[in-house]
Amino acid sequence: MSLTVEKIERDGIQSQSYLLNIGPSHPAMHGVIRFIARMDGERVEKIEDTEIGYLHRAFEKDCEQVGWGMAFPYTDRLNYVSPLINNCGYAMAVERLLGITVPERCEYIRTILSEISRITDHQTCIAASAMELGAFTPFIYLMKAREYLYELVEEVTGARLTVSYLRVGGVKADLPDGWLDKLPAVLDKVDKVNIEVNKLLARNRIFIDRMKDVGKISREKAIAYGFTGPLLRSAGVDFDVRRATPYHVYDRLDFDIPIGEVGDNYDRYLVRMEEMRQSDRIIRQCLGQIPNGSVTVTP
Amino acid sequence: MSETKKNNPSPVLDQLIARFGEAVQIADAPHGDTVIVEPTKAAEIIGWLKNEPGLDFNMLMDLHGVDYLPRDPRFEVVYQLYSLKHNRRIWLRVQLGELNPEIESVVSLYLGANWLEREAWDMFGIVFSGHPDLRRILMYEEFEGHPLRRDYPFNKRQPICPPLTKHL
Amino acid sequence: MAVNQESGFLTTKVSDFLGWCRKYSLFPYPFVTACCGMEYMSVSSAHYDLDRFGAAWPRFSPRQADLLMVVGTISHKMAPVLQMVYAQMCEPKWVMAFGVCTCTGGFYNNYATVQGIDTIVPVDIYVPGCPPRPEAVIDGIIKLQKKIQADHHSMFGPKSDERN
């Protein structure tokens, strides 16, 4: 980290860079992090230092104090935008240690709810990033669409956000009666909003100017830093854990994995948008395949 | 899945043992190929796994410390490597003693190891020699001790701000 | 407040009038750190619409805000930042503890977490819940408005219940 002033010369004009502290509480910061940015005019040239840990809540230490089954509420709050996926990851880890195979219906329920969570997560991400660029309308639209999905999740789990719905060896309870029948209508509504937001953003001059070629990361760097998820895929790496090591019932479902080209912000936006469409597809396929039966392992 | 793994060691493990012999021991784990590696050899083995043609473990998925308090050696550092090309994972466990737990850094191999090693240092006090910038990452500089060690009391707080003295 | 229909005048006390103005023009500063932020987004956007209660537009500069909404877990590392943001706000100012982590520390009884933000800044209203439902937040806002109305307000100088 160097905190010295650097001379810059451009078009024969002498100038110097300056340092700007961003965070840890900053309006454009959804999550707490602090940067010391080296600026050249209004361009961020470099991040001199990054400080994290402002939301270190000691999940590991807390989980050590409780039993295996009591750690689920902590996993909800790891990524609180898609808590059900985090529940799944933890439940699968414990189940693998115990050598448990969960019933088929449970696997389908987990898949459906994971994909609903994925949609809410991507919606929040796109909504927030659009808002920071000054586009408030997509934010309002997507928050409204997210509300439809939260209502669905609430009917199943009893909570909007921090669900703690999974258990080791199953889920808390079966889906409510008629829940699966109304799912397609809600997905239609959400899809309509996503299409509208995409129309507002994807070819918007301001949006493109501020997203294209910003925050570019190369394929090699993305791999070296160990990126996963949409960030890795937007850098052009064809890796999705749902395809590489299928869990739940992903090996029986047909879905595409969107891949970016240059790894800039705009690619990340496009990858997220397409993933929401694919999640929609996955849920609809699950609706046709989900069997009846038990939702937890029987002792 | 765990049964098949135990009976048929994967070709990667065979290659590892053929190359490094005594320094590598196969461990029994339900999740997949796991080896216990000698601390002095760890960085070399990881470098070999990354660069050897045919293996290509080009991603460091995770690196974390573990504290098994009553046990000797007390600490463990676990590396999880992944090969994008072959869709294969391997776990390396390195056991370190209680006094001066130190291991060679792998930042030169994987850029992502930088923060992960800082976290392991912050939480467990494991020193990574050759790390470019080994300082606390999650806790603040004033914090004393390493909170995820088993002998650190879970509710021992070290506040920076003094508590409010005058209430409404 | 009394309305004189004939003369078209409204008679009230300065304090009541200021309280009435202030309670319906709350400018919140969302100090968002964690999960509760998702519910804050819900409550401030179209579906639940905090605008109906006169507490709509988030001001991201503490100097322009009069309601500090502390949304999410505050760790010991974050505590000095929260204190600084509180100190930067102009009087009169109110603080809402949004979510159980800010009220008591919630279920994070560990080395990293502040056990209730009232140990570091004064708090006017507590909204527990993990995270609180948007309805609970709206209820909290209405309760805070009642509290503001009941406060003594003066045209100049700090709020009557001087706090340091």
Image: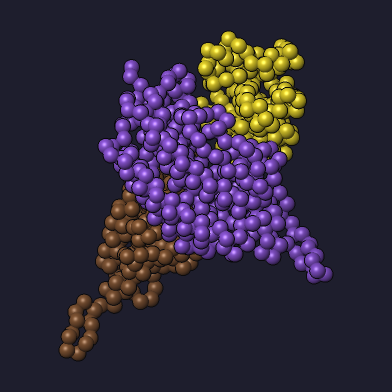
Q: In screen coordinates, is C128 left or right of A60? A: left
Is residue A289 at least partly visible in the picture?
Answer: yes
Vertical arrangement, residue C132 with respect to residue B128, above or below: below
Residue A192 x %, y %: 43, 54
Relative vertical location of residue B2 with respect to residue A93 in this rendering, above or below:
above
Q: Quadrant of residue B145?
A: top right
Residue occupying image coordinates x 61% and y 19%: B34
Viewer-closest of A201 and B14: A201
The residue drawn where x is 55% and y is 43% is: A53
Dividing the picture into quarters, in which one does residue A224 lie?
Answer: top right
Please state which of residues A297 and A248 is positioned toward the viewer in this rendering. Answer: A248
Residue B159, horizontal then vertical, whole percent: 49, 44
Chain in brown (letter):
C
Q: Colour of chain B?
A: yellow
Residue nearest the observer in this picture, A271 or C144: A271
Q: Look at chain A in the picture and name its colour.
A: purple
Image height check: is B45 above or below C71? Answer: above
Pick the quarter of the image with the C terminus of chain B: bottom left
Residue most toward the bottom?
C7
State the residue lying farthest toward the right.
A12
